[in-house]
Amino acid sequence: MVRRRTFGPVEEATLTGLSAGGGCAAKYSAARLDELLRGFVPVDAENLLVGLNPADDAAVYRLDDDRALVFTLDFFPPLVDDPAAFGRIAATNALNDVFAMGGSPLLALSIAAFPEELPTHVLASVFAAADEQVRAAGAILAGGHTIRDVEPKYGLAVVGTVRPDGIWPKAGARPGDALFLTKPLGTGLVLAGKGDADEAVAWMTTLNREAADVLRPFEPNAVTDVTGFGLFGHAHEMAERSGVRIRLDAASLPPLGDALEIARRGVRTGGDPRNREFAPVEADGVPEEVLALGYDAQTAGGLLVSLPADKGFSLEAEFRARDLFLRRVGAVEDGAGVAVS
Protein backbone atom coordinates (compact mmCIF):
# COMPACT_ATOMS: atom_id res chain seq x y z
CA MET A 1 0.00 0.00 0.00
CA VAL A 2 1.32 3.46 -0.90
CA ARG A 3 1.03 5.90 1.98
CA ARG A 4 0.59 9.60 1.32
CA ARG A 5 3.17 11.61 3.27
CA THR A 6 1.51 14.21 5.50
CA PHE A 7 2.94 17.24 7.28
CA GLY A 8 -0.01 18.49 9.31
CA PRO A 9 -2.03 21.54 8.27
CA VAL A 10 -0.39 22.84 5.11
CA GLU A 11 -1.53 26.38 5.84
CA GLU A 12 0.64 26.40 8.97
CA ALA A 13 3.67 24.60 7.51
CA THR A 14 6.76 26.41 6.30
CA LEU A 15 7.88 25.78 2.73
CA THR A 16 11.14 24.21 3.87
CA GLY A 17 9.17 22.04 6.28
CA LEU A 18 7.45 20.47 3.27
CA SER A 19 10.69 19.41 1.56
CA ALA A 20 13.37 16.85 2.34
CA GLY A 21 16.14 19.07 0.95
CA GLY A 22 16.04 22.23 -1.08
CA GLY A 23 17.89 24.22 -3.71
CA CYS A 24 20.69 22.74 -5.76
CA ALA A 25 21.65 20.46 -2.86
CA ALA A 26 18.68 18.39 -4.04
CA LYS A 27 20.52 17.53 -7.26
CA TYR A 28 20.89 13.88 -8.18
CA SER A 29 24.35 12.52 -7.41
CA ALA A 30 26.81 13.71 -10.07
CA ALA A 31 28.65 10.38 -9.97
CA ARG A 32 25.44 8.42 -10.57
CA LEU A 33 24.29 10.87 -13.22
CA ASP A 34 27.60 10.48 -15.05
CA GLU A 35 27.17 6.70 -14.99
CA LEU A 36 23.56 6.97 -16.17
CA LEU A 37 24.32 9.26 -19.11
CA ARG A 38 27.05 6.95 -20.40
CA GLY A 39 24.23 4.74 -21.65
CA PHE A 40 22.79 7.42 -23.91
CA VAL A 41 23.85 7.51 -27.55
CA PRO A 42 24.53 11.14 -28.59
CA VAL A 43 22.12 12.46 -31.20
CA ASP A 44 23.73 12.60 -34.64
CA ALA A 45 22.56 16.05 -35.67
CA GLU A 46 24.80 18.53 -37.45
CA ASN A 47 23.07 21.54 -35.91
CA LEU A 48 23.13 20.26 -32.32
CA LEU A 49 26.19 22.23 -31.25
CA VAL A 50 25.99 21.26 -27.55
CA GLY A 51 24.20 18.15 -26.31
CA LEU A 52 25.37 15.21 -24.23
CA ASN A 53 28.75 14.71 -25.89
CA PRO A 54 29.96 16.36 -23.79
CA ALA A 55 27.15 17.66 -21.59
CA ASP A 56 27.24 21.32 -20.58
CA ASP A 57 25.12 23.88 -18.71
CA ALA A 58 22.53 23.95 -21.53
CA ALA A 59 21.85 22.48 -24.95
CA VAL A 60 22.56 24.61 -28.02
CA TYR A 61 20.96 24.17 -31.47
CA ARG A 62 22.09 26.17 -34.48
CA LEU A 63 19.39 27.86 -36.55
CA ASP A 64 21.73 29.52 -39.07
CA ASP A 65 25.21 31.04 -39.25
CA ASP A 66 24.26 33.92 -36.95
CA ARG A 67 21.77 32.41 -34.51
CA ALA A 68 21.55 29.43 -32.18
CA LEU A 69 19.01 28.50 -29.52
CA VAL A 70 20.13 27.82 -25.94
CA PHE A 71 17.74 25.56 -24.02
CA THR A 72 17.81 24.57 -20.37
CA LEU A 73 15.55 23.65 -17.47
CA ASP A 74 16.08 23.65 -13.74
CA PHE A 75 13.79 23.18 -10.73
CA PHE A 76 14.10 22.17 -7.08
CA PRO A 77 12.34 22.11 -3.68
CA PRO A 78 12.36 25.26 -1.51
CA LEU A 79 15.44 26.20 0.49
CA VAL A 80 13.83 29.28 2.11
CA ASP A 81 10.38 29.84 3.57
CA ASP A 82 9.52 33.13 1.90
CA PRO A 83 7.54 32.21 -1.27
CA ALA A 84 8.69 35.26 -3.22
CA ALA A 85 12.35 34.59 -2.38
CA PHE A 86 11.91 30.94 -3.40
CA GLY A 87 10.42 31.92 -6.76
CA ARG A 88 13.13 34.48 -7.42
CA ILE A 89 15.96 32.11 -6.47
CA ALA A 90 14.60 29.26 -8.59
CA ALA A 91 14.17 31.56 -11.58
CA THR A 92 17.67 32.99 -11.18
CA ASN A 93 19.20 29.54 -11.02
CA ALA A 94 17.56 28.46 -14.29
CA LEU A 95 18.20 31.71 -16.16
CA ASN A 96 21.87 31.66 -15.18
CA ASP A 97 22.44 28.51 -17.26
CA VAL A 98 21.82 30.58 -20.39
CA PHE A 99 24.25 33.28 -19.25
CA ALA A 100 26.83 30.55 -18.53
CA MET A 101 26.69 29.54 -22.20
CA GLY A 102 27.29 33.12 -23.38
CA GLY A 103 23.64 33.55 -24.37
CA SER A 104 20.72 35.84 -23.57
CA PRO A 105 17.39 34.47 -22.25
CA LEU A 106 14.40 34.95 -24.53
CA LEU A 107 11.45 32.92 -23.20
CA ALA A 108 10.67 30.92 -20.04
CA LEU A 109 8.01 28.46 -18.89
CA SER A 110 7.26 27.56 -15.26
CA ILE A 111 7.71 24.04 -13.94
CA ALA A 112 5.71 23.78 -10.72
CA ALA A 113 4.62 21.10 -8.25
CA PHE A 114 2.75 22.07 -5.07
CA PRO A 115 0.45 20.49 -2.48
CA GLU A 116 -3.12 21.19 -3.53
CA GLU A 117 -3.89 22.33 0.03
CA LEU A 118 -1.27 25.07 -0.04
CA PRO A 119 -2.92 28.51 -0.01
CA THR A 120 -3.13 30.02 -3.49
CA HIS A 121 -1.51 33.27 -2.30
CA VAL A 122 1.69 31.29 -1.61
CA LEU A 123 1.80 29.99 -5.20
CA ALA A 124 0.91 33.44 -6.51
CA SER A 125 3.90 34.92 -4.68
CA VAL A 126 6.24 32.30 -6.16
CA PHE A 127 4.96 32.90 -9.69
CA ALA A 128 4.98 36.70 -9.42
CA ALA A 129 8.53 36.85 -8.10
CA ALA A 130 9.73 34.47 -10.81
CA ASP A 131 8.04 36.64 -13.43
CA GLU A 132 9.85 39.73 -12.11
CA GLN A 133 13.18 37.94 -12.30
CA VAL A 134 12.56 36.67 -15.82
CA ARG A 135 11.78 40.23 -16.91
CA ALA A 136 14.96 41.46 -15.21
CA ALA A 137 16.87 38.93 -17.30
CA GLY A 138 15.40 40.39 -20.48
CA ALA A 139 13.01 37.51 -21.15
CA ILE A 140 9.27 36.73 -20.96
CA LEU A 141 7.54 34.19 -18.71
CA ALA A 142 4.95 32.83 -21.14
CA GLY A 143 3.23 29.99 -19.27
CA GLY A 144 4.11 26.63 -17.78
CA HIS A 145 2.80 23.44 -16.22
CA THR A 146 1.71 22.78 -12.62
CA ILE A 147 1.01 19.44 -10.95
CA ARG A 148 -0.03 18.33 -7.46
CA ASP A 149 2.76 16.99 -5.23
CA VAL A 150 3.27 16.66 -1.48
CA GLU A 151 6.71 18.29 -1.83
CA PRO A 152 6.79 21.78 -3.39
CA LYS A 153 9.07 22.25 -6.38
CA TYR A 154 9.55 25.17 -8.75
CA GLY A 155 11.78 26.16 -11.63
CA LEU A 156 11.89 27.18 -15.26
CA ALA A 157 12.50 25.88 -18.73
CA VAL A 158 14.35 28.67 -20.54
CA VAL A 159 15.09 29.34 -24.20
CA GLY A 160 17.75 31.87 -25.13
CA THR A 161 19.86 32.86 -28.10
CA VAL A 162 23.60 32.93 -28.74
CA ARG A 163 25.85 33.36 -31.75
CA PRO A 164 27.20 29.95 -32.83
CA ASP A 165 30.73 31.37 -32.66
CA GLY A 166 30.09 32.92 -29.22
CA ILE A 167 29.25 29.81 -27.16
CA TRP A 168 31.09 29.47 -23.85
CA PRO A 169 31.76 25.74 -23.27
CA LYS A 170 33.02 24.00 -20.16
CA ALA A 171 35.50 22.15 -22.34
CA GLY A 172 37.72 25.01 -23.55
CA ALA A 173 40.09 25.76 -20.64
CA ARG A 174 43.75 25.96 -21.73
CA PRO A 175 47.07 25.78 -19.88
CA GLY A 176 48.14 29.30 -18.99
CA ASP A 177 44.59 30.50 -18.33
CA ALA A 178 43.65 32.29 -15.14
CA LEU A 179 40.50 31.24 -13.25
CA PHE A 180 37.96 33.70 -11.86
CA LEU A 181 34.79 33.43 -9.80
CA THR A 182 31.99 36.00 -9.93
CA LYS A 183 30.23 35.23 -6.61
CA PRO A 184 31.36 34.15 -3.13
CA LEU A 185 30.85 30.56 -1.98
CA GLY A 186 28.84 29.08 0.86
CA THR A 187 25.09 29.55 0.31
CA GLY A 188 24.36 25.99 1.44
CA LEU A 189 26.50 26.29 4.56
CA VAL A 190 25.05 29.66 5.53
CA LEU A 191 21.45 28.50 5.24
CA ALA A 192 22.09 25.17 6.97
CA GLY A 193 24.06 26.85 9.75
CA LYS A 194 21.51 29.61 10.39
CA GLY A 195 23.91 32.33 9.22
CA ASP A 196 23.00 35.56 7.45
CA ALA A 197 20.16 34.29 5.29
CA ASP A 198 19.44 37.75 3.89
CA GLU A 199 22.94 37.99 2.44
CA ALA A 200 22.68 34.48 1.01
CA VAL A 201 19.33 35.26 -0.61
CA ALA A 202 20.74 38.49 -2.05
CA TRP A 203 23.48 36.54 -3.84
CA MET A 204 21.12 33.73 -4.91
CA THR A 205 18.82 36.30 -6.52
CA THR A 206 21.65 38.08 -8.34
CA LEU A 207 21.46 37.24 -12.02
CA ASN A 208 24.73 36.53 -13.81
CA ARG A 209 23.58 38.86 -16.58
CA GLU A 210 25.84 41.80 -15.72
CA ALA A 211 28.86 39.59 -15.17
CA ALA A 212 28.26 37.89 -18.53
CA ASP A 213 27.89 41.25 -20.28
CA VAL A 214 31.28 42.40 -18.95
CA LEU A 215 32.89 39.05 -19.77
CA ARG A 216 31.62 38.72 -23.34
CA PRO A 217 34.17 41.05 -25.06
CA PHE A 218 37.03 39.14 -23.38
CA GLU A 219 36.13 35.92 -25.25
CA PRO A 220 36.75 33.46 -22.41
CA ASN A 221 37.97 29.97 -23.22
CA ALA A 222 35.63 28.18 -20.81
CA VAL A 223 32.76 29.14 -18.50
CA THR A 224 30.38 27.28 -16.22
CA ASP A 225 28.10 28.35 -13.39
CA VAL A 226 28.83 26.98 -9.93
CA THR A 227 25.73 25.26 -8.59
CA GLY A 228 24.86 21.94 -6.99
CA PHE A 229 28.17 20.14 -7.53
CA GLY A 230 30.06 22.89 -5.69
CA LEU A 231 33.13 24.74 -6.90
CA PHE A 232 35.26 21.59 -6.81
CA GLY A 233 32.68 19.56 -8.71
CA HIS A 234 32.30 22.11 -11.49
CA ALA A 235 36.07 22.67 -11.64
CA HIS A 236 36.43 18.88 -11.97
CA GLU A 237 34.05 18.90 -14.95
CA MET A 238 35.93 21.77 -16.59
CA ALA A 239 39.31 20.10 -16.07
CA GLU A 240 38.19 16.68 -17.28
CA ARG A 241 36.41 17.94 -20.39
CA SER A 242 39.20 20.36 -21.27
CA GLY A 243 41.97 17.80 -20.77
CA VAL A 244 43.82 20.06 -18.30
CA ARG A 245 44.74 20.37 -14.63
CA ILE A 246 43.07 23.06 -12.56
CA ARG A 247 44.94 24.45 -9.55
CA LEU A 248 42.86 26.42 -7.05
CA ASP A 249 44.33 28.74 -4.43
CA ALA A 250 42.77 27.81 -1.09
CA ALA A 251 43.44 31.24 0.40
CA SER A 252 41.67 32.96 -2.51
CA LEU A 253 38.37 31.06 -2.32
CA PRO A 254 35.85 33.75 -1.29
CA PRO A 255 33.53 32.76 1.58
CA LEU A 256 30.04 34.17 1.89
CA GLY A 257 29.58 35.83 5.27
CA ASP A 258 30.39 33.43 8.10
CA ALA A 259 30.40 30.30 5.90
CA LEU A 260 33.89 29.24 7.04
CA GLU A 261 33.02 29.59 10.73
CA ILE A 262 29.85 27.55 10.15
CA ALA A 263 31.94 24.88 8.39
CA ARG A 264 34.34 24.80 11.37
CA ARG A 265 31.35 23.93 13.56
CA GLY A 266 30.88 20.78 11.48
CA VAL A 267 27.78 21.91 9.58
CA ARG A 268 27.41 20.25 6.17
CA THR A 269 24.60 19.97 3.61
CA GLY A 270 23.35 16.79 1.96
CA GLY A 271 25.25 17.63 -1.22
CA ASP A 272 28.67 17.58 0.51
CA PRO A 273 29.31 13.79 0.57
CA ARG A 274 27.96 13.32 -2.95
CA ASN A 275 30.22 16.08 -4.28
CA ARG A 276 33.26 14.60 -2.51
CA GLU A 277 32.53 11.23 -4.13
CA PHE A 278 32.19 12.81 -7.56
CA ALA A 279 35.18 15.16 -7.49
CA PRO A 280 38.16 14.08 -5.36
CA VAL A 281 40.84 16.78 -5.24
CA GLU A 282 44.50 16.87 -4.28
CA ALA A 283 44.51 19.02 -1.15
CA ASP A 284 47.28 18.07 1.25
CA GLY A 285 47.35 20.42 4.21
CA VAL A 286 44.24 22.37 3.21
CA PRO A 287 41.96 23.02 6.24
CA GLU A 288 38.78 20.99 6.32
CA GLU A 289 36.59 24.10 6.47
CA VAL A 290 38.06 25.26 3.13
CA LEU A 291 37.33 21.86 1.61
CA ALA A 292 33.77 22.12 2.93
CA LEU A 293 33.46 25.52 1.26
CA GLY A 294 34.65 24.10 -2.06
CA TYR A 295 32.31 21.12 -1.89
CA ASP A 296 29.30 23.12 -0.67
CA ALA A 297 26.35 22.85 -3.06
CA GLN A 298 25.64 26.34 -4.40
CA THR A 299 22.27 27.57 -5.58
CA ALA A 300 22.33 30.22 -8.34
CA GLY A 301 26.08 30.54 -7.87
CA GLY A 302 28.53 32.62 -9.84
CA LEU A 303 30.41 31.96 -13.05
CA LEU A 304 33.69 30.04 -13.03
CA VAL A 305 35.69 31.62 -15.85
CA SER A 306 38.85 30.45 -17.61
CA LEU A 307 40.56 32.96 -19.88
CA PRO A 308 44.13 33.84 -20.94
CA ALA A 309 46.05 35.19 -17.95
CA ASP A 310 47.16 38.29 -19.87
CA LYS A 311 43.51 39.39 -20.02
CA GLY A 312 43.04 39.02 -16.28
CA PHE A 313 44.06 42.50 -15.13
CA SER A 314 41.79 44.17 -17.69
CA LEU A 315 38.91 41.91 -16.67
CA GLU A 316 39.40 42.79 -13.01
CA ALA A 317 39.47 46.48 -13.88
CA GLU A 318 36.19 46.22 -15.80
CA PHE A 319 34.47 44.42 -12.93
CA ARG A 320 35.74 47.02 -10.43
CA ALA A 321 34.51 49.85 -12.67
CA ARG A 322 30.99 48.39 -12.58
CA ASP A 323 31.16 47.52 -8.87
CA LEU A 324 30.77 43.81 -9.60
CA PHE A 325 32.27 40.97 -7.57
CA LEU A 326 35.25 39.12 -9.09
CA ARG A 327 37.93 36.97 -7.48
CA ARG A 328 40.93 35.29 -9.13
CA VAL A 329 40.89 31.78 -7.64
CA GLY A 330 43.44 29.76 -9.59
CA ALA A 331 45.08 28.78 -12.84
CA VAL A 332 45.01 26.14 -15.56
CA GLU A 333 48.02 23.87 -16.08
CA ASP A 334 49.07 20.90 -18.18
CA GLY A 335 47.96 17.64 -16.64
CA ALA A 336 44.72 16.33 -15.20
CA GLY A 337 42.46 16.68 -12.17
CA VAL A 338 41.96 19.44 -9.61
CA ALA A 339 44.51 20.48 -7.00
CA VAL A 340 43.91 22.85 -4.08
CA SER A 341 46.91 24.37 -2.35
Image: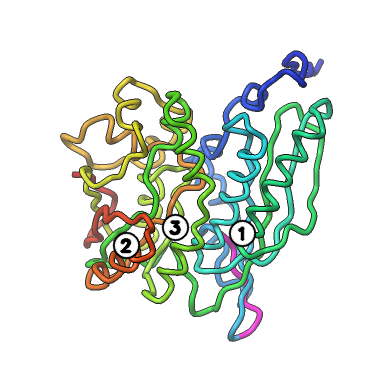
Q: Is residue 332 visible?
A: yes
Decide: few, some or many residues near mark 3? Use Cα within 10 Å; few <14, some 14-19, many ≥20: many
Quarter where residue 194 is shown: top left
State the extent of the magenta-drawn residues as a range: 58-64
Measure how far apart labels 2 and 3 are at the Cα level.
21 Å
Question: What residue do we see at 44% from left, 62% from top?
Answer: 211
Measure how far apart labels 3 and 1 are at the Cα level.
21 Å
Asked if the stretch drawn in magenta spans residue 46, the answer is no
Residue linked to disc 3? 224
Residue linked to disc 2? 320
Decide: few, some or many residues near mark 2? Use Cα within 10 Å; few <14, some 14-19, many ≥20: few
Number of marks = 3
Of 30 and 183, the residue lying toward us: 183
Q: Which tag, 1 or 2, sits closer to the chain's start?
A: 1
Residue linked to disc 1? 136
Q: Does 123 sit left or right of 336 as displayed?
A: right
Residue type beneath disc 3: Thr
Decide: few, some or many residues near mark 1? Use Cα within 10 Å; few <14, some 14-19, many ≥20: few
Which structural element holds mark 3? strand
**Figure quadrant of the C terminus:** top left
Question: What residue do we see at 79% from left, 18% from top?
Answer: 4
Residue 48 image offset from top left, x and y in percent: 61, 71
